[in-house]
Amino acid sequence: KTFKVAVVGATGAVGETMLSILAERNFPVGELVALASAKSAGTKVKYGHRDVVVQDLATFDPAGVDIALFSAGAATSKEHAPKFAAAGAVVIDNSSAFRYEDDVPLVVSEVNPDQVANRPRGIIANPNCSTMQMLVALAPIHRKAGIERINVATYQSVSGGGRSALEELGRQTAGILNFQDPEPKRFPVQIAFNLIPHIDDFQPNGYTKEEMKLVWETRKILGDDSIRVNPTAVRVPVFFGHSEAVNVETREKITADEVRTMLRAAPGVEVVDDREPGGYPTPVTHASGRDPVFVGRIRDDESHPRAVNLWIVSDNIRKGAALNAVQIAELVADER
Ligand code: 2RA
């Protein structure tokens, strides 16, 4: 069986990675449709070794599409995902548009794959990248010892902000070294050689929406509204790869040694945890272009009787978005 697959947002960083991963993993594509805005229509994107001509989403008829991968922003998903679903496609949406709707499953392929079948609206939501990598590492701990509370600080690369953010970091970095004004545009202040504790909109409670995504999505994916999450999301001058410093408090005592042993066998995880220089994952040495969620700096929290610290690094464009979406598509394909 082959499938007619549409990638919506095919010219974006995530969309292009979806195309390459579909090819890399030999997804059974009978026909591939690359969709984007009118301004991109007619350009070409790579699908493996092939060039595919981008079509205009606004005028595209979704009839016959079996699976549609969306990564074109929440507004585009809100407008077009229901049309693709109504035409019979299974929509896998990487935007935040439907993540928090009760009748839309929010799926991390290694954590709650069983939820894929539960899609009354024909839409499955892909979690936010920072949630994705955190839960691939924490789900085994939750199953074994029960998680009560998570404190997490994220160090998010600019690629999460798309092409314009990548360009801004590059331009400012080179410019500043040549004594040029940083001229912030995509970010509110200079991002080169700086840290910005602000991603997405501020909420009434003082957290940002990026931080609240970690709260809302953790509870939904693990199916436990009692889990308390206290996030701080920070944009850092890194091109690819999100990192997270996580402290997790558990109901049952679990030691760092037990966590390390368990994670070495956990799906989607690679433990890099040698207590010596370089014995830990970093965005540059581990995250860029690779699939696993890397975990290091695993150690007992000396300030708490039942808590463990971890350092979690992953490629936010691959596992954080594109790979998980394709893994969900594989689960859908296996149903047929
Ligand atoms: C970011 N997670 O990093 C958000 C959206 N990709 O900007």
Image (spheres, helix red, strand yellow):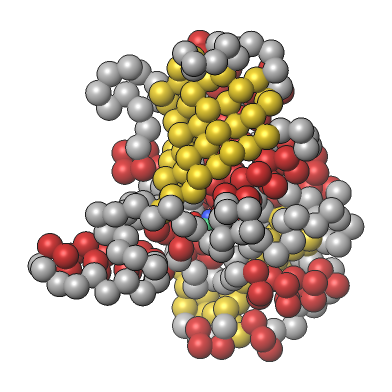
Residue beneath the point at 78% across and 37% down = 225
Q: Which residue is found at the position 68% from the left and 26% from the top?
A: 148
Q: In the figure, 84 relative to 252: above or below?
A: below
Image height of 140 relative to 85, above or below: above
- The residue lying toward the viewer, choosing from 107 and 47, is 107
Outermost residue toward the left in this view: 178
Instruction: Give the farthest residue toward the right.
Output: 120
Q: Nearer the viewer, residue 326 or 242?
A: 242
Quarter placement of the N terminus: bottom right
Residue at image x 37%, y 32%?
A: 281
Residue 176 place in picture, x, y as percent: 16, 65
Task: Please tell me which residue lies in front, 328 or 48.
Answer: 328
**Relative to 95, 159 lies left or right:** left
Residue farthest along the front direction in this orientation: 205
**Which residue is painted at 49% across and 69% down in the image?**
12
Q: Position of residue 157 (x, y in %)?
A: 40, 52
Percent across and percent down for residue 45 are 47, 73
Q: Is residue 190 visible?
A: yes
- Total residue callouts: 0
Give the side of residue 93 with respect to residue 209, left or right: right
In this image, 86 relative to 283: left or right? right
Task: Pinpoint residue 59: horizontal percent, then vertical percent.
Answer: 68, 89
Residue 20 drawn above or below residue 268: below
| Residue 260 appears in the rendering | no
Q: Quadrant of residue 9?
A: bottom right
In the shown orientation, is residue 168 left or right of residue 134? Answer: left
